[in-house]
Amino acid sequence: MEQKLIRKVLVPRLGDESVLEIVEAPVENPRTGEVQVQVLHSIVSGSDVNMRRGTYPFQKKPPFTPGYSMVGRVLTNGAGCQKFAAGSLVACLTVYGAQAERMNVPEKYLVPVPEALDRSQAVALVLDWMTAYRMLERSAKVRQGQRIFVHGLSGGVGTALLRLAALRGAEVHGTAAAGKHDELRNSGAVPYDYKQKDWIAEMQRLGGVDAVFDPLGYESFDESYSILRRGGLLVGYGQNLPALTHTPQRPAFPMIVKLFARNLAFWSGKRTTFFGLLRGSKGFNSDLEQLFQWLGEGRIQVPIKAVFALHDIQEAHRTYARNANIGSIVLNVSSE
Ligand SMILES: NC(=O)c1ccc[n+]([C@@H]2O[C@H](COP(=O)([O-])OP(=O)(O)OC[C@H]3O[C@@H](n4cnc5c(N)ncnc54)[C@H](OP(=O)(O)O)[C@@H]3O)[C@@H](O)[C@H]2O)c1
């Protein structure tokens, strides 16, 4: 097969938004077990921003092409692949590489996308909503009537946690910038300003929470632990505090050890865990199909913070930093 030149985002070195480039490069032919996909949409996530800064755990060294999730069309099947016909609409948790007009993906990680879906919303389901869904359903097993606390209710994952927990009938408290509180209240949350710490006393006064979802890490894990009731679970899923507070990056290892060591205090009745979304984990594809079905049925709606074209990648990262609006940032990578 002839190798085609494609446009893609490149992080040539670590740094601020200005390091991001759009380059032209050939795409390899798909290898055995791989499918070549035309990427229609990707997202710009907290993970991309941390990778650009060099603060994402165990990340690739530059140069690399980011892009944690994609929705696209199958172009060519590599040897041994026959699950998807050319032209099929598919999604994938790619981790890297989806901010490129074409990419090769192992067939086993592709999930079919119903044609009728809004594709901008569908691509946000793959990372942000799957993270939320699996933390709620598989880690914390949140049930009707339980009280939960979500750090960053206005973020990509935080918004998904709010909407999915509300569907389950849980009572959702959490933090966000004060200017977004009215919108969050309308979605059923009880919001607090993360610049104040009054939520800690308030959660303790209410008798504690059944689960906390914490992407901040460090001292935030201590605060989150302090608001658990007996039987409650702290789900850590990030180390975003230094990035959000513009303070120097700190080593994550002692924080993770401390998080898990808390489980030794079994008499407290509280538990802790750290969640990581892995596309190879059991039930990943069927969980994503479940979310696609709910989107198609109108049971869920995915708020989109902003949509950018591929060539506006620097502006997409600046919008991330400005924290305006609620939800996920979508990148239109190529058009049909
Ligand atoms: N473990 C996993 O599998 C996994 C999967 C996905 C994401 N993540 C991690 O989850 C984190 C969040 O990602 P995301 O894409 O949802 O981010 P996001 O959309 O940018 O959300 C960030 C949230 O943090 C809030 N925030 C800003 N400054 C803050 C501060 N000083 N203190 C407390 N909260 C503050 C923001 O509130 P305002 O906008 O209202 O200011 C917003 O709600 C990232 O670290 C990412 O790497 C982990």
Image: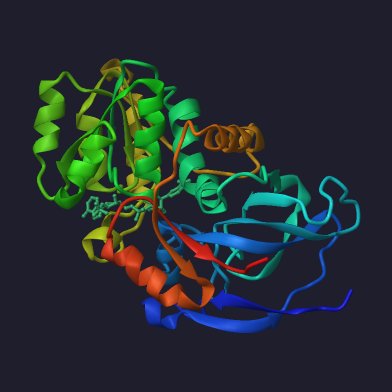
- 107 over 289 or under it: above or below: below
The foreground one among 195 and 260 is 195
How many numbered discs? 0
Whole-percent x, y for residue 335 in the image: 63, 67
Q: Is residue 143 visible?
A: yes
Whole-percent x, y for residue 319 in the image: 33, 67
Q: Quadrant of residue 199?
A: top left
The foreground one among 290 and 298 is 298
Residue, x 55% and y 51% (percent of image)?
123
- 28 over 92 or under it: above or below: below
Residue, x 86% and y 59% (percent of image)?
78
**Which residue is outermost to the front?**
116
Is 84 displayed left or right of 63 in the figure? right
Is 248 displayed left or right of 314 in the figure? left
The foreground one among 200 and 305 is 305
Is 44 displayed left or right of 189 in the figure? right
Q: Quadrant of the C terminus?
A: bottom right
By what rule are the colours in the image chosen? rainbow
Residue, x 59% and y 33% (percent of image)?
293
- 307 over 179 or under it: above or below: below
Q: Quadrant of residue 83?
A: top right
Q: Quadrant of residue 173?
A: top left
Residue, x 31% and y 63% (percent of image)?
249
Q: Is residue 222 visible?
A: no
Whole-percent x, y for residue 32 in the image: 86, 58
The foreground one among 104 and 162 is 162
Is 99 displayed left or right of 86 in the figure? left
Whole-percent x, y for residue 124 in the image: 50, 50
Q: Quadrant of the N terminus?
A: bottom right
